[in-house]
């Protein structure tokens, strides 16, 4: 009998790390497996963090984040969505993933039921599983040339002991973007049932037909059972900084302070000063990156959209494509072969939830010529696959 919890004993690397850890940071690999590009964080953000170090800002901070950063996040969200957020709702506990982890710990117990809208980033499943809760998936449908969530599917999955629903919009990996009407309806459903809605909006600025994606913040009141999680990784090219924010019910202010203290004693001090520079001075950066990603999306659709074995839908947001390689027996085996033979890193589809074995994910945030070269290699490997690699 193990001394450790069974929910921990069963944890294994997801399919992304299962591929990537073999050759992470190998300069011969074009890495399309992670959600980041090849542009370093802009200089003005790095300089702000360096200045903070030079100024000796290496001590403990408020566990919910420095007041000037929380205030800047409030102003940013107010301006973006036409709000007047209660500042007590904003916390900066550390990374965006940490925000999701704390939210799950706050609402899920062993024996509870939870729902993840899928396809989904695999770490969400692990985060929910370690609470001891039962996890089920509601899969988006491919309809009308787009990924869509059928709300009746979501409601049908709810059980009497459902305590949390996780929704990521814009979605990693499909690029699906939830509409304001859908958000309003789902929030009202959760409000009636007292189900905690954990909304991951980290790709809020990576949309291609609007300056910002719709947000649950536009509909939530101070004490609604919703935690909106966001961060700096994607919009400002700050993946390695591990800093994000949450907007949670105002009455949970003290609990977020306590949980942040338990997990990591608060976000890294000098990283918060870099984040402050990003959110106050980085609007041009956000727009430039979105333009780069939009062109990357065009390149992917141009190069992969006509292949007879591929089914690919144009993403509405985020910076991933999630093609279906019809009939492929193993998405992990395919990703491994592309890595071994062509030095391109892909994420196998099976790891994004049930029903995705024929899919793979690629990130199109890389510089454009590098992206084109990677896609040429992927196509070359795909065209060499023997018939035995496919089911009939």
Image: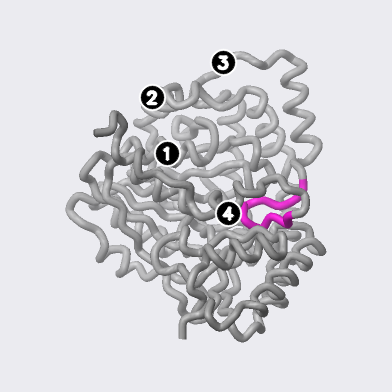
Q: From mark 1 to mark 4, how far is it between C-alphas?
A: 24 Å
Nearer mark to the viewer, of 4 and 3? 4
Where is residue 341 drawn, in percent x and y?
69, 65
- The residue positioned 59% from the left and 63% from the top of the image is 335
Q: Label 4: which residue? A: 19
Q: From mark 3 to mark 1, how far is it between C-alphas?
A: 22 Å
Q: Secondary structure at mark 4?
A: helix
Q: From mark 2 to mark 4, how far is it between C-alphas?
A: 40 Å
What label sits on residue 309 in the rendered view?
none
Q: Is residue 104 magenta?
A: no
**Vertical order, 39 against 59 (above or below):** below
Tags 1 and 2 in contact by the CB under 8 Å rule? no
Q: Which residues are magenta?
A: 29-39
**Number of on-image labels:** 4
Left or right placement of residue 54 versus residue 64 in this view? right
> Which of the marked residues, 1 or 2, is nearer the chain's N terminus?
1
């Amino acid at each position: 009998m193990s001394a450790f919890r069974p929910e921990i004993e069963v944890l294994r690397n997801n399919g992304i790390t299962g591929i990537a850890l073999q050759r992470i940071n190998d300069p011969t690999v074009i890495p399309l497996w992670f959600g980041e590009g090849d542009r370093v964080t802009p200089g003005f953000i790095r300089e702000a963090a360096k200045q903070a170090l030079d100024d000796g800002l290496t001590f403990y901070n408020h566990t919910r984040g420095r007041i000037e950063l929380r205030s800047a996040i409030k102003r940013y969200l107010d301006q973006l969505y036409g709000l007047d957020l209660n500042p007590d709702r904003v916390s900066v506990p550390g990374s965006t993933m940490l925000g999701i982890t704390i939210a799950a710990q706050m609402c899920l117990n062993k024996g509870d039921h939870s729902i993840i809208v899928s396809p989904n980033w695999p770490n969400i499943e692990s985060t929910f599983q370690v609470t001891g809760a039962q996890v089920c998936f509601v899969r988006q449908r491919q309809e009308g040339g787009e990924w869509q969530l059928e709300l009746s599917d979501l409601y049908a999955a709810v059980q009497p002991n459902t305590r949390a629903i996780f929704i990521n919009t814009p979605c990693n990996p499909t690029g699906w973007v939830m509409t304001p009407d859908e958000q309003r309806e789902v929030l009202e459903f959760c409000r009636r049932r007292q189900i905690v809605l954990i909304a991951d909006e980290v790709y809020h600025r990576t949309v291609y037909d609007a300056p910002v994606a719709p947000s649950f913040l536009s509909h939530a009141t101070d004490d609604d059972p919703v935690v909106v999680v966001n961060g700096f990784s994607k919009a400002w090219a700050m993946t390695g900084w591990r800093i994000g924010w949450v907007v949670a019910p105002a009455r949970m202010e003290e609990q977020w302070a306590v949980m942040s203290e338990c997990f990591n004693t608060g976000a890294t001090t000098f990283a918060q000063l870099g984040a402050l520079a990003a959110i106050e001075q980085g609007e041009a950066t956000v727009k430039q990156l979105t333009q780069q990603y939009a062109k990357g999306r065009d390149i992917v659709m141009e190069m992969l959209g006509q292949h007879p074995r591929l089914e690919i839908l144009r993403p509405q947001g985020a910076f991933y494509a999630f093609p279906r390689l019809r009939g492929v027996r193993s998405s992990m085996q395919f990703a491994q072969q592309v890595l071994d033979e062509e030095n391109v890193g892909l994420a196998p589809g099976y790891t994004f939830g049930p029903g995705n074995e024929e899919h793979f994910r690629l990130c199109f945030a890389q510089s454009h010529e590098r992206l084109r070269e990677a896609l040429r290699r992927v196509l070359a490997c795909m065209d060499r696959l023997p018939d035995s690699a496919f089911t009939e």
